[in-house]
Amino acid sequence: MTRLLACIDASTYANSVCALTAWAAKRLDGAVELLHVIQRKDSASARNDLSGAIGLGVKSELLEELTRIDEAAGKVAIEQGRALLNAAEETLKAAGVSEIHQTHRHGGIIDTIVEQEENADLVVIGKRGASSAFASEHIGSNLERVVRSSSKPVLIASRHVLEPKTAVLAYDGSSAARRALHYVAKSALFEGLAVHVVVAGPNTQKSFGLLEEASERLARRKPATVTHLADGPAETVIGDYLAKVEEPMLVMGAYGHSPFRAFIVGSTTTTMVRTAHAPVLLLR
């Protein structure tokens, strides 16, 4: 059975993650693992403790008070996480998902997701987390790290999710793009969906060759694949095309494996995740 790992927090994107997970789970006849992670924090540093500059006795009392506050906050975080998981499970059940499991963890978000995804086929996560819910046109601080660390396809939920009707595959012939192409060709996630292949580049033999390569791989699909070639920066070509089609979901290859890529700001992957007002499926 296909397994989906849905990562939720207290952000406004939790509802979008649930909606997108329900859509994917029903198409894949999959089971869902709902994951919520409580990040560990150091109470003294989190509260800018300056007690080292005062008497030892007072400092001890302050640290004890901070510990009590931290323990109380930890209990609240646990209860909040349980409430979020229960609400998400009810949402998925109402949407028709039958097999749902809850996982509640303490620790680092990235490490926990990578650990839990070992038994998953698809990871679903929101574009932004609770700490950056109002940072318009930005991506969450953990999202890019999750995508770079994950070995599984990552489906990123935009703030408002409607049921995707068109899969827009951004294709450049790279190894990651070819994996995305093969995934679209074989996955039940795309059965019955219109698939549009977009290539950004001049009217050259190479560009037409990319369209032909993708078309041949998708030749048996119904409805028939639509292809589009336009010259210009990839971010502009893809973004303009997404705005023209009905309820799109962008599919593209993710970052390369080179560690130096982690220091590049403004790559096509990052830009499209940041600016697309549609779900984005990334494959390494």
Image (spheres, helix red, strand yellow):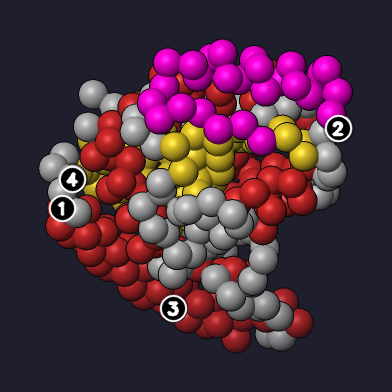
Kindly identify which residue carries mark 3: 69
**The residue under label 2 is which amino acid type?**
Pro
Dot 4 corresponds to which residue? 97
- Check disc 1 and give the amino acid type: Lys
Between label 4 and label 3, give the one nearer the viewer.
4
Q: Residue at x 64, y 72 (%)?
A: 135
Above or below, 92 relative to 53: above
Q: Position of residue 47 (x, y in %)?
A: 61, 78
Write down the region rendered in magenta: 203-228
Q: Is residue 213 magenta?
A: yes
User: Which dot marks residue 93?
Assistant: 1
Q: Amino acid at mark 3?
A: Ile
Asked whether the beta carbons under mark 3 and mark 2 sit within 8 Å of each other, the answer is: no
Q: Residue at x 39, y 37 (%)?
A: 193
Q: Circle 4 — which element? A: loop
The answer to whether any part of residue 279 appears in the image is no
Indicate which disc, 4 or 2, sits on the residue closer to the N terminus: 4
Q: CA distance from mark 4 to mark 2?
A: 45 Å
Q: Residue 131 at x, y = what percent?
A: 56, 69
Residue hosting label 2: 202
- Residue drawn 28% across the image and 31% down it: 28
